[in-house]
Amino acid sequence: MKQKIRTPYFEIGTKNYIWGDTVLEYAIAADKAAEKYDIDVLFITPATEIRRVCENTKHLIVLAPYMDTLRPGRGMADVLPEGLKAAGAKGVVINHCEKPMSLPQMKKTIERAKELDFLVFACADTIEEAKALAQLHPDILNPEPSELIGGTGGGVSSMDYVKTVIKEIKSIDENILVEQAAGITNGQQVYDFIMAGSEAAGAASGIMNAKDPIAMIDEMIAATRRAADDLKKLKEGK
């Protein structure tokens, strides 16, 4: 059965900023914060680290950063979907700007992921690409302008962009969860994006390049909890 995600959630991407024991250290910190604040946390980490992270955490939803669509058998060096699932992954990322895919490749990967009850976390650059991807019905869509990714100093997405892209995606498939992650470097930005309508926020370089990454993990997940509580108050009319 496909993993369920409670919203708002928080997503952490390690990319290749860290490896080995450091990945496990950050994963354990995220796991503790997920429990402390009662927030679902997605943890995206290289395939080489998935099994160890899964075996040493209890509250993380671990995703693979990529997979191929081959089936068991021949295929040297391809990333086998069944292997990722056996390692403990609950889903896969597709079309990140650092690992782009063609639309046919995305479609094939989503179909393959569905066979394994994998969550599909899809990335898009422009609003038009997000709309095209929404037609393939991933579980999560992360629309983020490429120039803002990787801590390049380009800031974060404007609130106009956030609200427009959420509206466009939801008009195609209201069940797709929409996240904002590009350029986020602090907890206040996490809070602001969720309060603006995003169902989640996430960070990679904003955590990995922080002065104290462990403290930043806690700060951002705490901000997700604060947004969840404030949204509940607004809904209840308090």
Image: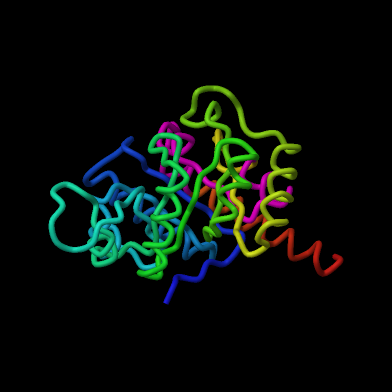
Q: Is residue 205 magenta?
A: yes
Looking at the picture, how far across and down is residue 67, in whole percent? 31, 52
The structure residue drawn at horizontal position 33% and vertical position 63%, both measured from the top left corner, is 57
Colour convention of the picture: rainbow
Looking at the picture, how far across and down is residue 160, in whole percent? 76, 37
- Asked if residue 195 lies left or right of residue 175, the reply is right
Extreme-bottom residue of the structure = 1
- The answer to which of 160 and 136 lies nearer the viewer is 136
Q: Which residues are magenta?
A: 189-217
- Asked if residue 88 lies left or right of residue 221, the reply is left
- The answer to which of 27 and 156 lies nearer the viewer is 156
Q: Quadrant of the C terminus?
A: bottom right
- The answer to which of 193 and 125 lies nearer the viewer is 125
- Asked if residue 27 lies left or right of residue 230, the reply is left
Looking at the picture, how far across and down is residue 147, in whole percent? 54, 26
Extreme-front residue of the structure = 104
Extreme-right residue of the structure = 237
Q: Is residue 1 above or below residue 226?
A: below
- The answer to which of 179 and 170 lies nearer the viewer is 170
Place residue 193 in its image quadrant.
Answer: top right
Looking at the picture, how far across and down is residue 188, in whole percent? 64, 41
Q: Tag count in the figure? A: 0
The structure residue drawn at horizontal position 18% and vertical position 63%, both measured from the top left corner, is 72
The structure residue drawn at horizontal position 42% and vertical position 50%, both measured from the top left corner, is 93
Extreme-top residue of the structure = 153
Q: Is residue 50 magenta?
A: no
The structure residue drawn at horizontal position 45% and vertical position 56%, both measured from the top left corner, is 42
Place residue 70 in its image quadrant.
Answer: bottom left
Q: Quadrant of the N terminus?
A: bottom left
